[in-house]
Image (cartoon, helix red, strand yellow):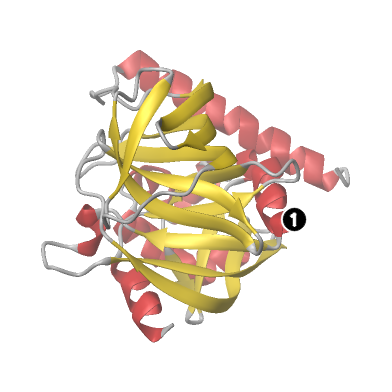
Amino acid sequence: MREFRSTWRRAWTAELCWVDANGCPNGIAVTPLLRSGTPCVALPYCHLGLAREIAAAGRVGAAVTDRRSLGGGTAGGLVAYGTVALTEDRSGQVFLDELLDQELVKYPPSRVLADSVLDRRENWWWTPRLLLELTGVDEVLEQPPRSAPVEHALLLRAGSAGVRIRNVTLHGASSERVSCTALDGAELPCFDTGTLFGHDYTAPDFERWESWRLFGDCRADGFVVRSREGNPTRRLTPLGLLERLRRERRIARACRDGIARAERGG
């Protein structure tokens, strides 16, 4: 656990994965933070439903498997499995007191919204108030790191004790049957209801950080895609001024709605 905590502390990005109430595995890209030595994730209230879904899963996989986050050395990726707990801190004070400095270093866009008291007052809706903490790690496994965002992904499946994660290479990600090869060279199991998940970001500014997901079944001759979210082969380019403004307004509206919903007891 000590090695995972150290890797999580140094990483710029990580992946948090779980199995939802319908038995479908899912994942999100996150900024890895530490609260009193415990790996955690802080989300704004636009992700209220998602945070509660993850907490309801009870058990998650927290992964640091992107080569960019592991540095230029030979260190392997790590995946920790354990229980997760959600704290809904509507005041946002826990984040401001304990986590803000880490966030400002690791995620540059947060500096625009929260680098000063004036910024935080003006953008009060942004402050992450949903804290997901990895409270009980009972297994840490090594995975080969992903070094090509377009070609490498996380293959997620539902195991007897929650989500299981493997790093894979993709061939033909735009087709309805995607060829997958485990990065560690091991044979992949066949199973129903799996997810291929990946993400990419513009460096070093993180202006765009986007995820994609392919939902389907893993077969001996490939991953059969039933539905998609996002585009694995999309190349990220800088946003125009109008797109930036629209995105900020959309996020602000969603955060305010989430806070209002929570205050109503929803």
Which x, y percent locates residue 213?
Answer: 47, 32
Which x, y percent locates residue 260?
Answer: 77, 39
Residue 90 at least partly seen: no
- Rendered view: 212 above or below 91: above
Taking depth in this image into account, of 207 and 26 the one nearest to the observer is 26
Taking depth in this image into account, of 121 and 189 the one nearest to the observer is 189
- Residue, far bottom: 2
Q: Is residue 128 left or right of residue 23?
A: left
Taking depth in this image into account, of 142 and 251 the one nearest to the observer is 142
- Which quadrant: the N terminus? bottom left
Residue 217, located in which quarter of the rendered image?
A: top right
What residue appears at the point 46 percent right and 55 percent down from the top-left corner? 165
Residue 191, located in which quarter of the rendered image?
A: top right
Instruction: Kindly identify which residue carries mark 1.
Output: 56
- Rendered view: 20 above or below 95: above
- Residue, far front: 220
- Residue, far right: 265
Q: Is residue 129 left or right of residue 149?
A: right
Describe the element under mark 1 as helix, strand or loop: helix
Taking depth in this image into account, of 51 and 126 the one nearest to the observer is 51
What residue appears at the point 64 percent right and 41 percent down from the top-left corner? 24
Q: Residues within 10 Å of mark 1 (few under 14, many from 20)?
A: some
- Rendered view: 28 above or below 215: below
- Which quadrant: the C terminus? top right
Which x, y percent locates residue 224?
Answer: 48, 26
What residue appears at the point 70 percent right and 44 percent down from the top-left corner? 23
Which x, y percent locates residue 180?
Answer: 34, 38
> Mark 1: which amino acid?
Ala
Q: Is residue 187 left or right of residue 131?
A: left
